[in-house]
Image: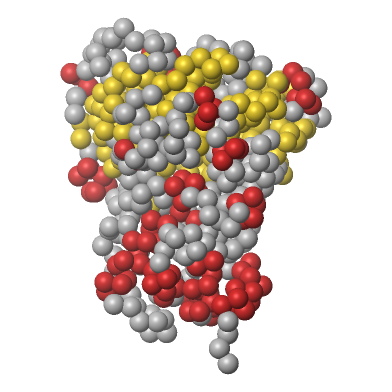
Amino acid sequence: MPIRKGKIRYLAALSLLALAGPLALAQTPDAAKAGHSDETMRDYQASGGSPLAAVPMHQDINPLAPKMSEEEFDKAKRIFFERCAGCHGVLRKGATGKPLTPDITLEKGLEYLKVFIKFGSAGGMPNWGTSGVLSDDEVDLMARYVQQTPPAPPEFGLKEMEASWKVIVPVDKRPTRKMNNLNLDNLFSVTLRDAGKIALIDGDSKKIVNILNTGYAVHISRMSASGRYLFVIGRDAKINLIDLWMEKPDTVAEIKVGMEARSVESSKAKGYEDKYAIAGSYWPPQFVIMDGDTLKPRKIVSTRGMVVGTQEYHPEPRVAAIVASHFKPAFFVNVKETGMVYSVDYSDLNNLSIKMIEAAPFLHDGGFESSHRYFMDAANASNKIAVIDTKESRLTSLVDVGKTPHPGRGANFVDPKFGPVWATGHLGDETISLIGTDPKKHPQNAWKVVRTLKGLGGGSLFLKTHAKSNNLWVDATLNPDPAISQAVAVFDINHLDKGYELIPIGEWSGLKAGPRRVVQPEFNKAGDEVWFSVWNGKDEESAIVVVDDKTRKLKAVIRDPRLVTPTGKFNVFNTQHDVY
């Protein structure tokens, strides 16, 4: 007797939790209720494709799996790396999404998988079919593909790095002093995500200084300790080293450190300023230490290993956030899937010392609290913040917070009742958690959630304040409700109980079309302006909106055809000194 489609959907829903888990960068509970029709998550995860999509890989056909031609296999591989690998992992071992290996998928069967892929789940799996992203034929293709043995991309080692490495302007040919009249402390590095570029914008005049070609979908910008060199890294693992002292700041060196990546940082310890840089890869799972003024690769370290708690081997633990200790020559490296934080002593690269700190899966992003000693590290699959002491290289605490924390670098301020706190928003709920961070003067509040605020809704990516500001600004970029994603919440730090004021940033931009998603507040050096990206599609006009922090009124709108999909913004001074 044939099973009706509605019956299949019902049966699939009963067992979805066995296969799918919440996707930390995917859907909020509100999005689940909305039927996963919102395209923001897919844009944030894929945004035009993964660098791995076109890489040749071996097709190892499992005899128990449905048959696939080589052409079908290659097409499915491309779709998987564009749409699925960000959550389920390159080798399908599981990350923020659950594992999709043949021992699981073969048992589920073809029809179940087709329903699952087409209709999604309330646990976070997007409805790839009913949303129109995948056709029925492509849904069938992907249901067969995930039953095959996962293909592994090639490794990427020193030989490949050196082949990509270019020193465009040798060190001895660079300026010996600043050759421009720019106020570098108030310069902004702005990611132009889908253009494969960054814009350098003068924070004083609001004028674009230069547009630079970079890797694909730059993830972050980081400053050298001196403030001279700017490092940017794309999702394709390409790093640009930009000399801000040049008459017109430009790239002086570049390298690819892998095939997909997210993180770069520069040494900050006394005596090591600007000496080294470090970058971590999503694929291969490793990090590399380089010379800070040329990007010459010096030391590569694999992160493959055992998961905290279960002690299960994970072949693909990706490197997420990296911070540099202000107290000693050490980098602190997030190993995402294993839940480990590596304290990497870079004082002797020939005898590299690594201390493995157990935190919790899956480590993603975070930043320092106000003393710069403790790294507040979001373990988004565990709904925890790991507090890492970067002076003693140890775990201080694991703090339970809301669902799927995503702080960016977080926000530091003094709560009028509880003293110094660090704040995080969440992708999975509307809350904002405030964690006490002063174990000396406020020990009773240290490493605890002392206050929970109610924000706009789930889907928050970033929040920010400044030492000279009385405001806490919080976005909700991935919320499926346009009225929320096009606005921000702002709290008065001295009167947190009063709740937030809604600021219509998208409306203030003057843009009439597009989703107008508002993302990432970033302060200028003085702390009297806060900048927001109004993020539209690649073929639509975007903008940057500048707000007067004190009055909460519109101050300026930066609109330029070259500002294609602006997302992250990084003020040079604040990034250099970890001010947030």
Query: Is 249 in front, or is 13?
Result: 13
For residue 273, above or below residue 193: above
Could you tell me if residue 93 is visible in this image?
Answer: no
Residue found 79% across the figure and 26% down from its top: 497
Q: Is residue 135 visible?
A: yes
Image-quadrant location for residue 55: bottom left
Colouring style: secondary structure
Q: Residue furthest top?
A: 181
Residue drawn at point x = 64 percent, y = 37 percent: 425
Whether 225 is drawn above or below 79: the answer is above
Q: Within the image, what quadrant is residue 387 found in?
A: top right
Residue at position x 58%, y 28% in the image: 504
**Residue 42 place in picture, x, y as percent:** 46, 51
Count the numbered circles shown. Answer: 0
Judged left or right of residue 460, residue 234 is: left
Quadrant that contains the C terminus: top right
Instruction: Give the quadrant of the N terminus.
Output: bottom right
Residue 34 point in image, percent of width and height: 61, 54
Residue in front for this viewpoint, 235 or 478: 478
Residue at 49 percent across and 19 percent down: it is 546
Q: Residue furthest bottom?
A: 1
In this rendering, would 119 be left or right of 191?
Answer: right
- The residue nearer to you, when weighing 542 against 573, is 542
Vertical comparison of 389 with 311: above or below:
above
Q: Is residue 487 left or right of residue 322?
A: right
**Residue 320's x, y, as percent?**
48, 44
**Nearer-the-camera pick, 162 or 515:** 515
Q: Give residue 215's position: percent from left, percent from top.
A: 30, 39
- Vertical position of residue 41 compared to residue 444: above or below: below
